[in-house]
Every structure is written in structure tokens, then in C-alpha cells.
């Protein structure tokens, strides 16, 4: 769509707002002022809240005391929980150490039994071979002679 | 500098020699494992390193007043390893000469055969070998090989082995303590039951 210069001039030329324009504007201004007065301001609200507290100091102390008690109870509960956890971990470590000790003991007992078994077989076979070979003297003497 | 280098090389050679002696004293017995299937009873003991130390510690904790325990302690204290493989068969000829040879072939010139017994009537062949330490003053290892028709036993003890003490160990002491050791034994008859 194209606008000619005449169209623009026509559209932008001064127009008469008509009679009573000033009165209408002033009436709007008055109305806006009246609405502003009736709305409560935020600053005013806070001031009234603080004023309420100032009037009831006992409530303030009660709330602060309650909060302090809550913190103290929470702290105590937490320390109890931590203590319990530490005890549980210590008991678990102790149990693990005892189990490990038992395992080592069992392993040592088994090793001892195996060593004794091995020496028993060694003794039996050594004496058997010496008997078969009809060696009347002790093995230490033989060893010394041969070495 | 050359002197320090010489000392280091000398030390390394000594360590290598000592290690070599230790390795020579241990005979590989794994080749006999295949006989386990045929054997009615297998006794397999392998004790070295920390396990042997455990055993020594346990024996050392035992009653000091007992002479047998004292003797056992004196035997065990210088040992580095105890290896036993014993196979008892229900029938004869369950193992071959090659099985025995696999053990005998590892015996080097440093080993000395101190006893040999061959009984052709009962087909039994027994041998005892000693390995001398580097200085020649101590025993570094013992090998006892007993090959009977129905039994093959190889005992290899590494370390300074007081053979005469083992030979004179009280039988009753060993038997008493052997009860727990019996659990190690695999008895085929039980398996079949």
C-alpha cells in the first residue's frame, strides 16, 4: 500500500480535541489521586507488623527460646547419632579384626598340622629307607661320612 | 668408583648364587599330580613362605616343657619349605618309571645320594639325596624318594634340615597331632561312598 504525501499530511494535521477535553483530563487526574490514597503502602504494612511485636515482647522471647531449644535438641540428637555411628563402626571393625584373627589362627593351625604331617611322613619314609638299606648307624653319621 | 661397582657386582652374584641354591633344593613335583586320579589315597603338603612361618609360630607358641615340641621347633626353625606328595594305590603299577624319572631328572650334580635301596623281589626302589649348602657345612635340602609297587612318596625339604632329628622324632607325638592333618587327605573310598 502506498501513501502519498497528501495522505500523510491529511493524517497528521492538527485536530480539535473537542469541547470539555480539559475537564476530562482533570477528572482523570483526580480519580487517580483518590485511588492512590485508598491503596495501603508496603512500608506502612511492615511498620504495623513491627508495632505488633513491640506490643508483645513475651511472644518474642517465647519464639526465640523455642528456636534455641530446637537447635539444642537437634544438636544433641545429631551428636547422639554421630556417637552411635562411631560406636557401630568401631564394633564392626572389631568384629572384622576378630574374624581376621580367627581366620589367621585357623590357617596357622592348618599349617601346623600340615607341617607335622609332612614331618611324620618324612620320618616314616626316612626310617623305612634306612631299614630297607639295612643301615645300622644313625643318619647323622652317614651324612657326615658322605659330605 | 670401580671398587664400589665391584662390590655391587659381587653382592649381586652372591645373592644370585644363594637364590640358585634355594631354587636347586626345591624339586618340582607338579608332574606327579596326574597320579591323583588313580590313587586311593593322596597326601599333598606344600608349605613354604608365610604358611611355613605360620606353622613355625604355632609350634613356637606350644608348651616349652615338652621335649618333642622342643625337637620339632629345632627341626622347623631353619626350614624354608616342605613339600610332600604321597600316592597310595589299590593296585600295583599305577605309576610309570617316567613319573619317577620326572623327579629324579631334577637332581643336579650338587645333590649327593646318601642312601639307595633297591629290592627287586618286592620291586621297591628307595633313595635319599642331600644337597649341600654353598659352604658345604650345612644341608640346603633333602629329597626322599620311595617307590613301592603300590605307593609312591616324594618328600622334599628345603633349608637346613637336621635329618638326624627328623629320623629320631617321636612317633607318638606326631600321631597325636596328626588327627587334624588327616583331614587334608583325600580318601577315594570315602568319595565313592
Image: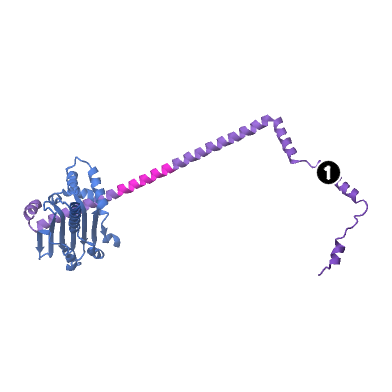
Residue at 38% across / 46% down in the picture? Answer: A96
Q: B188 above or below B136?
A: below
Provide the residue span drawn in magenta.
Answer: A89-106
Which x, y percent locates residue A99? 36, 47
Which x, y percent locates residue A104? 31, 48
Main secondary structure type of the part rendered in magenta: helix
Which x, y percent locates residue B134? 13, 54
Residue at 55% across / 38% down in the picture? Answer: A74
Q: B168 above or below B103?
A: above
Chain B image colour = blue
Is B86 positioned to the left or the right of A8 in the image? left
Q: A8 above or below A24?
A: below
Here the colouring is by chain
Which x, y percent locates residue B9? 19, 55
Chain A image colour = purple
Count neighbours of disc 1 (C-alpha within 10 A) and say few if under 14, some if 14 to 19, many if 20 or more.
Answer: few
Is A107 positioned to the left or the right of A46 in the image? left
What residue is shown with label 1? A33
Amino acid at each position: 500500500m502506498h501513501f502519498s504525501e497528501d495522505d500523510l499530511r491529511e493524517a497528521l494535521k492538527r485536530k480539535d480535541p473537542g469541547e470539555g477535553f480539559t475537564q476530562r483530563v482533570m477528572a482523570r487526574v483526580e480519580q487517580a489521586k483518590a485511588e492512590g490514597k485508598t491503596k495501603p503502602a508496603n512500608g506502612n504494612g511492615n511498620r504495623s507488623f513491627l508495632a505488633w511485636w513491640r506490643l508483645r515482647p513475651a511472644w518474642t522471647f517465647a519464639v526465640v527460646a523455642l528456636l534455641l531449644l530446637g537447635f539444642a535438641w537437634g544438636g544433641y540428637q545429631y551428636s547422639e547419632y554421630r556417637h552411635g555411628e562411631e560406636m557401630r563402626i568401631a564394633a564392626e571393625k572389631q568384629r572384622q579384626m576378630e574374624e581376621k584373627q580367627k581366620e589367621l589362627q585357623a590357617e596357622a593351625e592348618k599349617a601346623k598340622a600340615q607341617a607335622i604331617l609332612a614331618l611324620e611322613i618324612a620320618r616314616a619314609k626316612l626310617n623305612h629307607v634306612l631299614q630297607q638299606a639295612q643301615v645300622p648307624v644313625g643318619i647323622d653319621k652317614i651324612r657326615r661320612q658322605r659330605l | 668408583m670401580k671398587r664400589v661397582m665391584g662390590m655391587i657386582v659381587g653382592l649381586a652374584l652372591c645373592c644370585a648364587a644363594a637364590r640358585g641354591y634355594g631354587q636347586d633344593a626345591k624339586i618340582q613335583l607338579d608332574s606327579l599330580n596326574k597320579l591323583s586320579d588313580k590313587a586311593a589315597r593322596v597326601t599333598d603338603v606344600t608349605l613354604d613362605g608365610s604358611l611355613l612361618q605360620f606353622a613355625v609360630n604355632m609350634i613356637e607358641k606350644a608348651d616349652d616343657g615338652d621335649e618333642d615340641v622342643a625337637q620339632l621347633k629345632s627341626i622347623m626353625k631353619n626350614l624354608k619349605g616342605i613339600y610332600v606328595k604321597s600316592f597310595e594305590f589299590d593296585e600295583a603299577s599305577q605309576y610309570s618309571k617316567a613319573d619317577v624319572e620326572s623327579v629324579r631328572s631334577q637332581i643336579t650334580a650338587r645333590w649327593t645320594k646318601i642312601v639307595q635301596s633297591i629290592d627287586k623281589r618286592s620291586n621297591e626302589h628307595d633313595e635319599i639325596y642331600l644337597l649341600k649348602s654353598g659352604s658345604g657345612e650345612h644341608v640346603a635340602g633333602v629329597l626322599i624318594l620311595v617307590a613301592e609297587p603300590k605307593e609312591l612318596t616324594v618328600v622334599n625339604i628345603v633349608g637346613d634340615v637336621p635329618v638326624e632329628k627328623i629320623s629320631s622324632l617321636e612317633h607318638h607325638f606326631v600321631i597325636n597331632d596328626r588327627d587334624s592333618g588327616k583331614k587334608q587327605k583325600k580318601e577315594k573310598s570315602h568319595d565313592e561312598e
